[in-house]
Image (cartoon, rainbow, N blue to C red):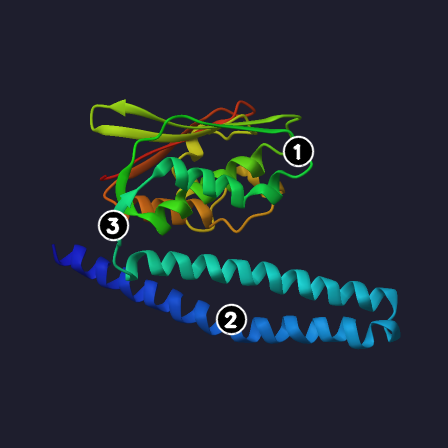
Amino acid sequence: QRHSVELEEINTELESFTHSASHDLRTPLRFMNRIAHQLLHEHGAELTPEAVGRVKMILKSTEEMGRLVEKLLQIARVRQEPLNRRRVDLQRLVNEAISQLGDEMDGRQVEITVDELPGCHADRELLKQVFMNLLQNALKFTRPRDRAVIQIGHEMTGDGGTYYVRDNGIGFEMDQSESIFLMFSRASKAHSFDGSGIGLALVKRIIERHNGRIWAESEVDRGATFFFTFDT
């Protein structure tokens, strides 16, 4: 029991550190990004093509770091902020998430089907992050396919209901099915794709805050399915 208490205290301290460090990183990142933009707009004509390329590399790196910082802040907030449970129209929520990811489908053949989803009581904003991250994950790893097929559904099970997001992407080895939910951990074939390695860890934390669990089933080159349950 004492060991459990100590672990909880350590986790709380780490969450606080993550939040503080991520928050403090925002200012220097924004400063670097602003200076790089000014260099291009005010002195771009004076720079060599090589110098312009390097400034653009700075911009790309600060933007990627900014996205990573935002993900870390989201991770910290999941445990620190109280749940705002209310009645959620899941059908509407999922359609909103799909609409917001429209840019990631431009120029691609993407078929997304949404089965009938029952309503639930949950923190709407956190639950939306779950579907946004799982959909982004599915869209990312179906890029090599001529036609991406993604299905969002629900099935009744003994402990209530199970939700799932299924895709026909590159898949992964089942011995990695637990490690992919760890911070900064990615499946072996995923390293050739852009990503922070935080999205699935965030999803897991949100589901666990709702007294649920998440797991994945997959085969290499035969897609993946992410299942999750939560206290509705």
Image check: 192 left or right of 84? right
The residue shown at (65%, 31%) is 144
Percent x, y for residue 58?
69, 66
Image check: 46 left or right of 14? right
Q: Earlier in the sequence, mark 3 or mark 1?
A: 3
Which residue is denoted by mark 3 in the rendering? 85
Regarding mark 2 in the picture, which secondary structure is present there? helix
Image check: 42 left or right of 4? right
Q: Would you say the residues marked 3 and 1 are in contact, meaning their CB atoms lie under 8 Å apart?
A: no
Percent x, y for residue 145?
64, 27
Which residue in the rendered view is the most extreme toward the left? 1
Closer-to-camera residue (76/101):
101
Percent x, y for residue 176?
44, 35
The kind of residue tagged 2 is Arg
Q: Residues within 10 Å of mark 2 (few under 14, many from 20)?
A: some
Q: Residues within 10 Å of mark 1 (few under 14, many from 20)?
A: few
Q: Is residue 189 visible?
A: no
In the rendered image, which quarter is residue 141 located in?
top right
The quadrant of the image that shows the C terminus is: top left
Regarding mark 1 in the picture, which secondary structure is present there? loop
Q: Which mark is residue 26?
A: 2
Percent x, y for residue 44?
83, 72
The quadrant of the image that shows the N terminus is: bottom left
Q: CA distance from mark 3 to mark 2?
A: 30 Å
Instruction: Determine whether 183 is above or below 223 in the image.
Output: below
Which residue is denoted by mark 1 in the rendering? 108
The kind of residue tagged 3 is Arg
Q: Earlier in the sequence, mark 3 or mark 2?
A: 2
Regarding mark 3 in the picture, which secondary structure is present there? strand
Instruction: Determine whether 113 is above or below 71 in the image.
Output: above
